[in-house]
Amino acid sequence: MSKSLDTVPYAKGLHEVADGVFAYLQPDGGWGWSNAGLLASDWSSLLIDTLFDLNLTRDMLDSMSTVTSGRPIDVVVNTHANGDHCYGNSLVGGRDGVQIITTEAAAQEMNAMPPSAISALLAIDLGETTNKYVREAFGPFSFDDIDLPPADRTFQGELQLDVGGRTVELIEVGPAHTSGDLIVYLPDASTVFCGDILFINGTPIIWDGPVSNWIDACDRIIGLEADVVVPGHGPLTDAEGVTAVRDYLSFIEKECKERHASGQTAEEAIAEIDLGVYKEWGEWERLAVNVHAIYREIDGESSVQSPLELFSAMAELKSGV
């Protein structure tokens, strides 16, 4: 039985959202401050995502120990390959009796942005504006001693697991936010963990796309009619929160298609799109990445701007440079 969303505060730590189902929340949900989840059966547990560094992941696992001490974690599911959802894998996976599962695409992408690349991004002089932006985003985290064990099991499409007699449905919905996004649906708890298909009160960021897949993923989540929806970032939500994310993506897609058809460049579109109420969301400057992603899709281009270019674009947009 799931709990009323009104009874679960958006506070850091472990919260039971249904019988034997827990969300680990990390306000304020901005860069790196991701959520995770835990499903406990009578004799084992399944962990949904680890966190951005080892210290954060240790704290999370410690908070879960009252649940997992008698029901040890034997499965880790990574919703996608971004580091704030998998960099802590070595503290749980890579040992006897513990299996790491993700999509085939996510497994292939796991080392695309290794911890060393983020450390390098923090060390490079990108100019005062971008340096400040990158430090604010990633400075609170430690990327030392992180080792990513390979996934033990991958899949495409859908995969059903049995966790101590409880059914867990893994549903691939990427490429969208990244190349290999999946959601985790727990039918008996009417709960779905969405990874970064959902940013609540924060702005989605299209690293991969196409945007149509992401919109379809939102519709898929709504169709599950789950009582509890756990986003990758931000507070717990329901169908209303999913609809808001879908509407943002549809709005940006429409703006880009119309502006592209009129001959505007991506840079001109970024400068002129009026976000309206969406500018109240955190990290609204991700508009710069999203417009470039949709323009790339319209033009049929496969090349992606470098992280340096994308972070510079966001930093300059936010600062008004």
Image (cartoon, grey):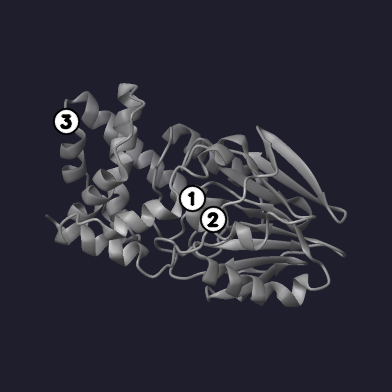
Asked whether residue 232 appears in the rendered view, the answer is no
> Which residue sits at x=76%, y=49%?
168
User: Given this view, does label 1 or label 3 mark the residue nearer the observer?
Assistant: 1
- Cα separation, mark 1 vs mark 3, equals 31 Å
In this rendering, position of residue 245 left or right of residue 95: left
Q: Amino acid at mark 3?
A: Gln
Q: How many numbered discs sit on the rendered protein?
A: 3
Q: What secondary structure is found at the residue carrying circle 2?
A: helix
Q: Position of residue 303 (x, y in %)?
A: 33, 29
| Residue at the spot of label 2 | 85
Q: Earlier in the sequence, mark 3 or mark 2?
A: 2
> Which residue sits at x=19%, y=52%?
317
Say above or below: 87 vs 17.
Answer: above
- Cα separation, mark 3 vs mark 2, equals 36 Å
- Cα separation, mark 2 vs mark 1, equals 6 Å
Q: Amino acid at mark 2?
A: His
Q: Position of residue 77 (x, y in %)?
A: 66, 51
Mark drawn on residue 82: 1
User: Could you tell me which quadrant the N terminus lies in?
Assistant: bottom right
Asked whether residue 215 appears in the rendered view, the answer is yes
> Which residue sits at x=16%, y=30%?
264
- Give the residue furthest to the left: 321
Q: Residues within 10 Å of mark 1 (few under 14, many from 20)?
A: many
Say above or below: 179 vs 279.
Answer: above
